[in-house]
Image: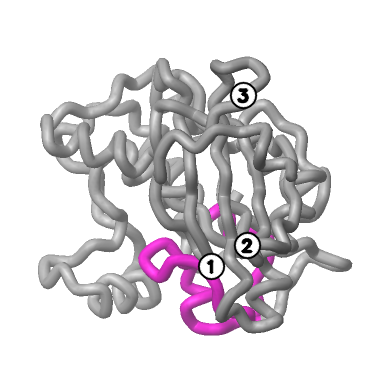
């Protein structure tokens, strides 16, 4: 069995449909990998197809700032799909943002610019190379290298390939607080919905808060603000970045998808 080539180190958490483990390759006794173990037990046929689609999508992507696919197989004895990817020891961007917020320490300007450029190029690769819409861009799905200098886009579980044209149907997927207005309103949407997602990431990295959080702090009030407000709140006073940073995030967070870059 392919998994016999690996040693289980620890469980990292739980993903959309299964368990995420840290494994070590026995051959080298040093190379760590991430194994997503997606159990077919209890999944609908549609959910099973979604899980298998992620493996197919990852196999087709080759970019320095997209999490590297290393292999996959179906373990029939356990009734699960196993997807093996590179391990990025810096954790996810959401964790880095939480740490910065708790320390009240904003990220250095050059680092923010570097992260944004890397994610922009990764997203442009997805859109132009394979007409792939990620559909769930958020800090939890961006992974950091050990030195925190490099970011990598991951978790393509709800991504979709565009067969033709540039618009999808009203498929309601993603994480609510990071969804674009057109997705929340169940309108047709396309590649520009990912631009919105990247705008929310840039805003949150700079301000250490989500762009449409309200004083009430409820999910409903945030979703209502996304759909009805004229734009996000200005960066807080402590976020001393060049005006272009805030301008870029506001442009990507335009309610009208046609006005986004």
| In front of the other: 154 or 219 | 154
Q: Is residue 57 magenta?
A: no
Q: Which badge, 1 or 3, is on the more N-terminal residue? A: 3
Mark 3–mark 2 Cα distance, whole angstroms, equals: 21 Å
Residue 26 falls in image quadrant: top right
- Residue, x 68% and y 69% (percent of image)? 50
Tell me the residue that label 2 is attached to.
Answer: 78
Among all residues in the image, which is located at the extreme right? Answer: 164
Vertical comparison of 39 with 20: above or below: below
Residue position marked by numbered label 3 in the rendering: 26
Bounds of the magenta span? 170-195
Residue 117 makes an appearance in the image: no
Q: Is residue 74 positioned above or below 60 on the image?
A: below
Q: Give the residue drawn at x 40%, y 70%.
A: 176
Cα separation between marks 2 and 1: 47 Å
User: Percent x, y for residue 62?
Assistant: 76, 34
């Amino acid at each position: 069995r392919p998994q016999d080539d690996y040693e289980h180190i620890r469980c990292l958490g739980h993903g959309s449909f299964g368990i995420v483990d840290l494994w070590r390759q026995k051959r080298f006794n040093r190379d760590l990998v991430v194994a997503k173990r997606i159990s077919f037990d209890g999944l609908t046929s549609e959910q099973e197809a979604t899980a298998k689609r992620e493996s197919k999508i990852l196999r087709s992507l080759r970019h320095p700032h997209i999490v590297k696919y290393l292999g996959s197989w179906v373990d029939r004895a356990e009734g699960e799909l196993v997807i093996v990817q590179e391990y990025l020891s810096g954790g996810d961007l959401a964790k880095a943002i939480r740490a910065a917020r708790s320390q009240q320490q904003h990220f250095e300007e050059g680092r923010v610019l570097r992260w944004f450029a890397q994610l922009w190029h990764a997203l442009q690769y997805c859109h132009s190379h394979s007409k792939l819409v990620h559909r769930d861009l958020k800090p939890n799905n961006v992974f950091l290298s050990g030195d925190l200098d490099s970011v990598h886009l991951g978790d393509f579980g709800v991504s979709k390939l565009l067969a033709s044209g540039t618009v999808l149907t009203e498929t309601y997927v993603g994480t609510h607080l990071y969804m674009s207005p057109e997705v929340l309103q169940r309108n047709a949407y396309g590649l520009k919905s990912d631009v919105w997602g990247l705008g929310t990431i840039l805003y949150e990295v700079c301000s250490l808060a989500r762009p449409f959080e309200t004083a009430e702090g409820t999910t409903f009030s945030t979703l209502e603000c996304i759909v009805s407000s004229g734009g996000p709140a200005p960066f807080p006073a402590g976020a001393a970045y060049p005006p272009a940073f805030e301008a870029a995030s506001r442009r990507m967070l335009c309610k009208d998808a046609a006005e986004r870059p």
